Image: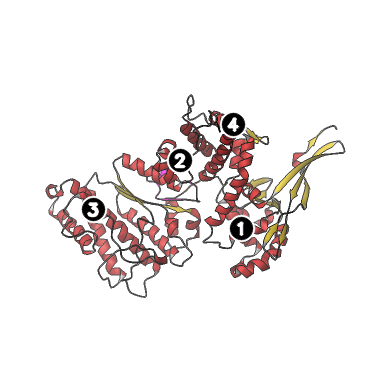
């Protein structure tokens, strides 16, 4: 089929930032937001955000920016940089958090040491102007690495490419993941900590001496080591604590940054968490930034000319029709997202494919509405997968809402929940402690439902802190709302019928519901008509 000239070649990018980076697209379209600049300038070292919020895009763009300045940058992921389970460490008084923190500290200090040796090797350090004290520190670093099989004693002097090799490990991580440090027998964790203190002291001394030694370690995809085991939490806590303490020890020429899902961060509880408050950059997107992001991607991919990057609205209208059901088309799309870039990209790419197949010159309202059903199914499935570790029962709980109402009272959902409780608790006994209030708070926190308060609709992505205040006073909530992203996937449909009553036109909102089959734990879609509500706020009074 012949493609339209305007939409031919348009792409809003990939779901995965790493793919955009690999293809060179990310560098061209990355939006340098205020939160990026705070991380870029060293004001923050912990970046948190929901899945799809742009953590990896920031990480990869930051890596490129730092390398352009001449800073050595190591991108560490759970596949590349894993914490060893220190099986040699004994002593019942040692807790997992301390054990993992020391293990992570070992890994980071080894990486820094190897990069430091590489830097010296490139300078031909045998003739470099080091005093006797500094040469002693160098020998101690080299000795530590060789003693722990991180470098070969006889080969350490050879070409610098050798030092690019990653550590060889033999231990097993929780969950059976192969990692591996081969260390000499260590009787207690304090022996290792003492050795690491000396190693850290040597690194500080030498790195301070080398004014142009600049290193950044960016730790991404931490959620890959997040699972349902008891060890996963202290594993991540140990990682974060080690990064915070190393950043405190080193000067600005050595920095470590972590990129972590906000739901995982929020679930962690440890004594030093308050020390991260000023270091945590929580990613939050405004509608304006999302519109700049998506139009920049469309304009760049299609090589549209004659536009300035700040002509956002004009670019949007070139690619999209302005309205969907008399509503601004961009707002129509973003209202069906949790305000995350990945969701906007996915929705727009779906609509784009349909528009191209229809040979349209713009993405029409019909294209957008046709894309919505598939998008909605994706989002419901993605939400379940996002929280499958914390809430393995979520898919079944969300089944309660199939064929339900878009807007509902606490009493109405209470009745529905009671119908399903027996079935749910047979499958998930832990739900016995999840009363209705806790269920509503959970669904609010993950973005599945919102609340209507004083006539305003509020969702967790509008202000991450405000929902906590609202949920503490459930009695003030006028109604609960299923997020529009999930309406079509759940079969929630609403019809507006205008009638004439006493020479006044009134909009009647009719919600179509289904029948929840308690025995099967699923919905049988039907034609039952549910609540009929007069929308007093939308009255259009006039003569018939």
Along the polypeptide, which appears first: circle 1 or circle 2? 2
**Measured Cα–Cα span from mark 2 to mark 4:** 36 Å
The residue that appears at 33% across and 68% down in the rendered structure is 86
Residue 286 seen by the camera: no
Name the side, left or right, on which 227 lies relative to 379.
left
**Discs 4/3, front:** 4
Q: Which residue is mark 1?
A: 441
The residue carrying mark 2 is 34
Label for residue 360?
A: 4
Q: Nearer the viewer, mark 2 or mark 4?
A: 4
- How crowded pointer 4 is (Cα within 10 Å; few <14, some 14-19, many 20+) is rated as some
Q: What's the image's color scheme? A: secondary structure
Q: Measured from the top left, where is residue 533 in percent x and y? A: 78, 47
CA gap between label 4 and label 3 equals: 55 Å
User: Of circles 1 and 3, which is in front?
Assistant: 3
Would you say the residues marked 2 and 3 are in contact, meaning their CB atoms lie under 8 Å apart?
A: no
- Please state, as top left, top right, bottom left or bottom right, where the N terminus lies in the image: top right
Q: Residue furthest right?
A: 502
Label 2 or label 3, whichever comes before in sequence order: 2
The answer to whether residue 55 is seen in the rendering is: yes
User: Alpha carbon of mark 1 to alpha carbon of mark 3: how far?
Assistant: 51 Å
Q: Which residues are magenta?
A: 33-53
The location of residue 305, given as percent across then percent down, is 47, 25
x and y percent of residue 481 in the render?
A: 66, 50
Is residue 441 on the magenta stretch? Answer: no
Give the residue at mark 3.
163
Residue 374 vs 235, above or below: the answer is: above
Q: Secondary structure at mark 3?
A: helix
Of the residues under marks 2 and 4, which one precedes in the sequence? 2
Of pointers 4 and 1, the one earlier in the residue sequence: 4
Q: Which residue is situated farthest in the bottom direction here?
A: 92
């Amino acid at each position: 089929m012949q493609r339209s000239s305007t939409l031919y070649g348009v792409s809003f990018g990939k779901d995965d930032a790493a793919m955009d980076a690999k293809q060179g697209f990310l560098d061209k379209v990355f939006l340098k937001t205020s939160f990026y600049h705070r991380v870029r300038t060293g004001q923050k070292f912990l970046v948190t955000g929901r899945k799809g919020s742009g953590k990896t895009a920031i990480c990869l763009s930051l890596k490129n920016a730092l390398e352009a300045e001449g800073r050595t940058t190591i991108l560490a992921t759970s596949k590349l940089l894993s914490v060893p389970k220190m099986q040699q460490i004994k002593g019942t008084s040692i807790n997992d958090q301390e054990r993992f923190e020391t293990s992570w500290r070992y890994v980071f200090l080894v990486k820094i040491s190897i990069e430091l040796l590489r830097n010296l090797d490139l300078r031909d350090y045998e003739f470099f102007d080091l005093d006797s004290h500094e040469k002693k520190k160098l020998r101690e670093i080299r000795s530590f690495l060789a003693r722990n099989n991180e470098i070969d004693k006889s080969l350490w002097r050879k070409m610098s490419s050798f030092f690019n090799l990653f550590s060889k490990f033999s231990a097993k991580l929780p969950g059976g993941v192969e990692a591996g440090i081969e260390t000499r027998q260590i009787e207690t964790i304090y022996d290792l900590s003492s050795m690491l203190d000396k190693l850290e002291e040597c690194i500080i001394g030498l790195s301070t001496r080398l004014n142009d030694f600049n290193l950044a370690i960016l730790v991404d995809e931490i959620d890959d080591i997040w699972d349902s085991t008891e060890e996963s939490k202290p594993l991540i806590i140990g990682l974060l604590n080690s990064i915070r303490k190393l950043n405190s020890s080193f000067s600005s020429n050595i920095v470590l940054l972590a990129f972590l899902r906000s739901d995982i961060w929020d679930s962690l509880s440890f004594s030093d968490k308050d020390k991260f408050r000023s270091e945590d950059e929580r990613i939050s997107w405004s509608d304006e930034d999302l519109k700049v992001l998506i139009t920049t991607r469309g304009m760049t991919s299609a090589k549209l000319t004659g536009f300035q990057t700040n002509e956002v609205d004009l670019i949007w209208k070139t690619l999209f029709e302005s309205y969907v059901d008399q509503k601004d088309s961009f707002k129509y799309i973003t209202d069906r997202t949790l305000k995350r870039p990945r969701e906007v990209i996915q929705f727009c790419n779906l609509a784009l494919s349909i528009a191209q197949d229809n040979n349209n010159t713009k993405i029409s309202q019909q294209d957008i509405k046709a894309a919505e059903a598939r998008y909605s199914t994706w989002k419901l499935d993605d939400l379940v997968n996002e929280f499958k570790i914390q809430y393995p029962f979520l898919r079944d709980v969300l089944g309660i809402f199939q064929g339900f109402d878009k807007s509902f009272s606490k009493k109405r959902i209470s009745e529905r929940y009671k119908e399903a409780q027996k079935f749910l608790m047979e499958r998930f006994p832990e739900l016995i402690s999840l009363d209705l209030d806790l269920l509503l708070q959970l669904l609010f926190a993950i973005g599945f439902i919102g609340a209507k308060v004083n006539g305003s609709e509020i969702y967790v992505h509008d202000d991450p802190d405000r929902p906590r205040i609202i949920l503490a006073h459930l009695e003030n909530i006028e109604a609960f709302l299923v997020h529009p992203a999930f309406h079509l996937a759940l079969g929630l449909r609403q019809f507006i019928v205008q009638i004439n009553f006493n020479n006044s036109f009134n909009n009647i909102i009719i919600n179509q519901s289904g029948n929840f089959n308690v025995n099967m734990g699923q919905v049988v879609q039907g034609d039952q008509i549910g609540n009929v509500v007069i929308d007093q706020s939308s009255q259009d009074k006039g003569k018939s």
